Image: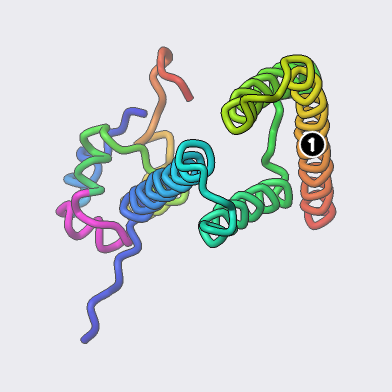
Amino acid sequence: MKNRMRMYRVGVGFTQEELAFKVDVTRQTIGLIEAGKYNPSLNLCIAICKTLGVTLDEIFWMEDDQDV
Amino acid sequence: MFKKQVKDERIVGEQRRLNSEGFSLLYLGLLVDIFYRSVIARQNITDFWDIALLFWGVTGYVAIRTIGKGIAYYGGKNSILRKIIPPAAAASLVGSLTFKCLDPSITVGQLVYDALIFFIGFSMVTYLIYWISDKKANHIEDDSNLLEK
């Protein structure tokens, strides 16, 4: 799963630590999601989107050749 | 001021995965231990009844919970034979070799007969597990559909 989380997070002015605190995860988890090394649950995706004020498909998407 | 408690899904998920791996290692260890005690060391079951009871208790618990949650999935009617026959054949073969090891005087004919009975019994129990689990899964689905209405 690909994402533009870093771009939107920086755009809103949050650090990884601040976003992590707001969505109830650790800073490392945010870092891993941004690096594409951890696929978050739908609940966490929605929490991130609500916090950053964007819709799900603006941040997260699947590449055509990726398995769902 | 109390620090906000973090419930990180990644950490919780990793912890569950590690717990599951730990359980699998312990379970395999118990199986190997029982095999060693009964087949190689030739101990009587009364010498290690606590370990055997723990093993069968855990096996029964996992089996009952799996059936109760309807997750013993066999992959549809077309693949049911593939899910039943190979494990039953493997269990019969291992069981036969173990019995032969425990009692070398047993005849080949008797061994084949016992293996056949075991194969049929094992297949029937496995089928029953899948059948009950499937019914349970359908029941859970029906209940959730009723809640939506």
The boundaries of the magenta stretch are A15-28
Q: Quadrant of the C terminus of chain B?
A: bottom right
Q: Secondary structure at mark 1?
A: helix
Residue plotted at (76% across, 17% down)? B112
Q: Looking at the image, what colour scheme do you see?
A: rainbow
The amino acid type of the residue labelled 1 equals Val
Residue B45 drawn at (x, y percent): 59, 53
Vertical arrangement, residue A59 with respect to residue B111, above or below:
below
Residue plotted at (52% across, 37% down)? B39
Instruction: Give the letter of the chain under mark 1.
Output: B
Residue B56 drawn at (x, y percent): 61, 52
Q: Which residue is labeled 1 in the image?
A: B125
Residue B63 drawn at (x, y percent): 66, 47
Q: Quadrant of residue B132?
A: top right
Residue plotted at (26% across, 32% down)? A36
Residue plotted at (25% across, 42% down)? A8
Observer-nearest of A35 and B121: B121
Observer-nearest of B83 and B104: B104
Residue B55 is covered by the magenta coloring:
no
